[in-house]
Image (tube, helix red, strand yellow):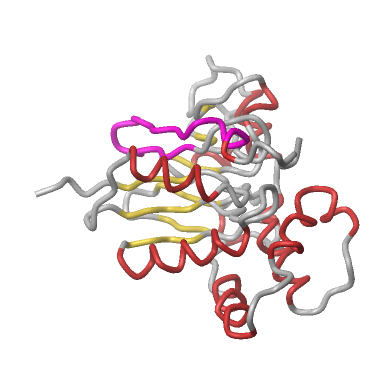
């Protein structure tokens, strides 16, 4: 019998071909819990196809789908919000083009998918999974602004800047981090610090390995810390810019 694994999947950004490749490399089974960190769309051309594929995965596997900021932006557009030029510049245009010829049935299925996304997932061992971060020192239940869960960048910035010699019991150790044994995020690509593999700072793991740009897509086993990566996602879409 296969081990029960919790596998975290980084930001996909419509890179469906890379997602298929990396899930095959990780040899996912029905015993696995697949935690998707959000940002399923905005970047490459297969937005609609990516959501369709995720809906199919959910029928067969235990999936947790978290909400990313790009998913929220797409949902707002699908429900009639005014055009958002900034969103268009950051991958939204490719998503709008992908949705150009969908049926009403598909649109309604996707709206339900976006509506049902979770802001965070907390497992029995106090391991927290969310797209971006949180700011309340007491933890997620006390967060005043829910959008923080999928827009915040200060949690990762805090973890990166933390003095490695600071003991957890020290008065200056960030209270935010002490609420959870581990925290798994995406949102801020590690390519910004010159990396293309999952990065650990304090008890925070960043699994966004830059799939929207020049990096691969990553699946990460939280127990063993083993990970699998696709080819650089842009190689699957040679005639596209993604968010580069």
Viewer-proximal residue among 155 and 100: 100
Position of the C terminus, as image quadrant, is top right
> Does the magenta segment cover residue 234?
yes
Which quadrant of the structure image shows residue 61?
bottom left
Which quadrant of the structure image shows residue 105?
bottom right
Residue 119 screen position, x and y as percent: 57, 62
Residue 157 screen position, x and y as percent: 68, 32
Query: Could you tell me which residue is drawn at 85 percent across and 49 percent down?
Result: 89
Q: Is residue 226 visible?
A: yes
Q: In this view, does 42 lie to the left or right of 179?
A: right
Viewer-proximal residue among 31 and 143: 31
Q: In this view, does 179 lie to the left or right of 220?
A: right
Q: Is residue 187 left or right of residue 27?
A: right
Query: Could you tell me which residue is drawn at 54 percent across and 17 percent down?
Result: 164
Spot the residue most to the left.
1
Relative to 156, does residue 85 appear above or below in the rendering? below
Q: Can residue 200 be seen in this view?
A: no
Query: Could you tell me which residue is drawn at 72 percent across and 41 percent down?
Result: 240
Spot the residue most to the front.
239
Viewer-proximal residue among 26 and 202: 26
> Does the magenta segment cover residue 127?
no
Span colored in magenta? 218-235
Relative to 150, does residue 110 appear above or below in the rendering? below
Viewer-proximal residue among 126 and 240: 240
Residue 159 screen position, x and y as percent: 60, 30
Residue 182 screen position, x and y as percent: 44, 39
């Amino acid at each position: 019998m296969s081990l029960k694994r919790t596998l975290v999947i980084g930001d996909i950004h419509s890179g469906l071909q890379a997602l298929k490749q990396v899930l095959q490399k990780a040899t996912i089974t029905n015993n696995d819990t697949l935690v998707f960190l959000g940002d399923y769309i905005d970047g490459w051309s297969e937005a609609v196809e990516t959501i369709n594929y995720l809906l199919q995965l959910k029928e067969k596997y235990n999936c947790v789908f978290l909400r990313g900021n790009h998913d929220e932006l797409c949902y707002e557009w699908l429900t009639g919000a005014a055009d958002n030029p900034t969103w268009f510049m950051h991958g939204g245009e490719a998503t709008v083009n992908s949705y150009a010829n969908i049926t009403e049935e598909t649109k309604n299925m996707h709206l339900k998918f976006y509506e049902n996304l979770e802001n965070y997932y907390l497992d029995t061992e106090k391991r927290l999974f969310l797209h971006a971060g949180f700011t309340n020192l007491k933890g997620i239940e006390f967060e005043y602004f829910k959008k923080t869960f999928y827009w915040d960048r200060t949690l990762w910035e805090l973890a990166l800047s933390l003095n490695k010699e600071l003991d957890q019991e020290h008065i200056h150790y960030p209270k935010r981090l002490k609420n959870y044994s581990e925290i798994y995020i995406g949102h801020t690509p590690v390519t910004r610090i010159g990396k293309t593999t999952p990065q650990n700072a304090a008890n925070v793991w960043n699994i966004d390995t830059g799939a929207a740009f020049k990096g691969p897509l990553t699946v990460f086993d939280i127990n063993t810390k083993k990970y699998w990566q696709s080819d650089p996602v842009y190689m699957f879409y040679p005639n596209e810019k993604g968010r580069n």
